[in-house]
Image (cartoon, rainbow, N blue to C red):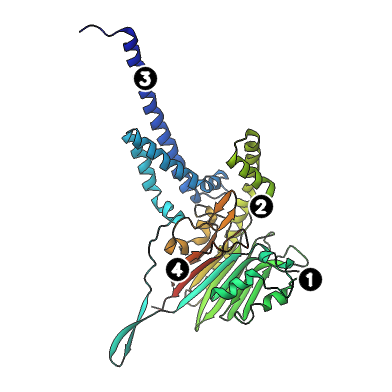
Amino acid sequence: MAALPFWRRAAKVLFRAFWRSIRVAATALALAVSLLLVASAYSDMISPLVWIVAPFLGLFFPVFLLVALSCLAGLLAIKRWRSSLVIVASLLICSGRIWRYCPMHLSAPEPVTNVLVEDGVEGRTPVDTFRVLTFNTCATGKAKLWKKDEPIPVMELARESGADVVCFQEYQFSRKGGYEEPQLRATLQKEYPYYHIVYNSDQKKPVMGVAIFSKWPLVKQEKIDKREKKYCWAGYYELNVRGRRVALVNCHLQSNSISDKNRKLYQEQVEHFQADSLRRMEEGLRQLGPSFRTRTEQVSIINRYLAERRKQWSEPLPMLICGDMNDTPTSFTYRALRGDMADTWQDAGFGPGITFRSAPFWFRIDHIFHSSHFRTLDVEVMRDQKMSDHYPVMATFQLLPRE
């Protein structure tokens, strides 16, 4: 057989070199994407006080997940099986974190029932339910701008929700004119006779805080800490629910304090790439560092307070922790505050459950945690309510009988 022409031999060599470089690049890409995905998924194990990069990795977890899935599809398309297996392995390692971030429940959990015997016939009756609404109202939907004879949408939402307990964050009222605190409270007095507010202690005449409206008596009500900074409040409550004491924490942790200017820069960068705005966006992200650290310290304060409270209980109380925590399910704040409790959205939610909706940021940062005394029946992010930059979250529980 005659020797191949020089140009054909050269073409074959170049073609083999090209595919060899593609294989090397595919392997390197798969390793890099997999490492980033795993690092972001488990970044909640590292405190921001120890390594400030960790919370930023967690913040971009959904981005790394989408990149990993896209890379996997591309590698399968070009039949790079071994490189594909690397990404598949990382997805399996992160499967628990993926489910935490984006559960996919297709049906509601089965309610727990009590055995009921009447006239010798055995039947079953559902355990009583308990509904909680938590909502960062963005200054009560700007209540200070409303006239006293006009209904406030935020308060109307609470009235019509059917919740047993309503927990507001950024509950704001007017000092004079508009709705002052007594008038604002009176709008829900009939439906929710029990009320308490934790004020912002940084102001001589506070006009904002976290508030609870309850159909059940508040046996105990207390501000958790009096040293927290502005926009970081938490209240502890014990409610008498059908003769049973239930503990509840309503909190608003440190805001990320992203200015409107920086939000606009991020939006511009998403829509049109600009090197200069990218640099400024990086500077803006650096401002998140102090917020991550502050929330870590606040969670430590709350956990120490709850540890002292638990020592005073004669038996473990059913407990709920809810509010605007300003951190995602892959954050140290989330993991540290949740502890051994369950996440209501992870119990019964579907999808990422976005609760914060200020473009270009869409995250689930409003959470409801519960102890094993509760069973989640339903949870809903009320996306039809657009009176705030947050969506309300409504959860329906069963308070399980004592064993």
Check contact, mark 2 vs mark 4: CB within 8 A: no
Mark 3, other Cα within 10 Å: few <14 / some 14–19 / many ≥20: few
| Residue 368 % position (x, y) | 51, 65
Q: CA distance from mark 4 to mark 3?
A: 57 Å
The residue pinned by badge 3 equals 17
* Label of residue 177 in the image: 1
Kind of residue at disc 1: Gly
Tell me the quarter of the image containing the N terminus.
top left
| Residue at (79% x, 71% y) in the render | 177
| Residue 190 % position (x, y) | 62, 82
Name the mark nearer the viewer: 1 or 2: 1
* Label of residue 257 in the image: 2
| Residue at (38% x, 61% y) in the render | 106
Badge 3 or badge 1: first in the primary sequence:
3
Badge 4 or badge 3: first in the primary sequence:
3
Q: Residue furthest top?
A: 2
The residue pinned by badge 4 equals 378
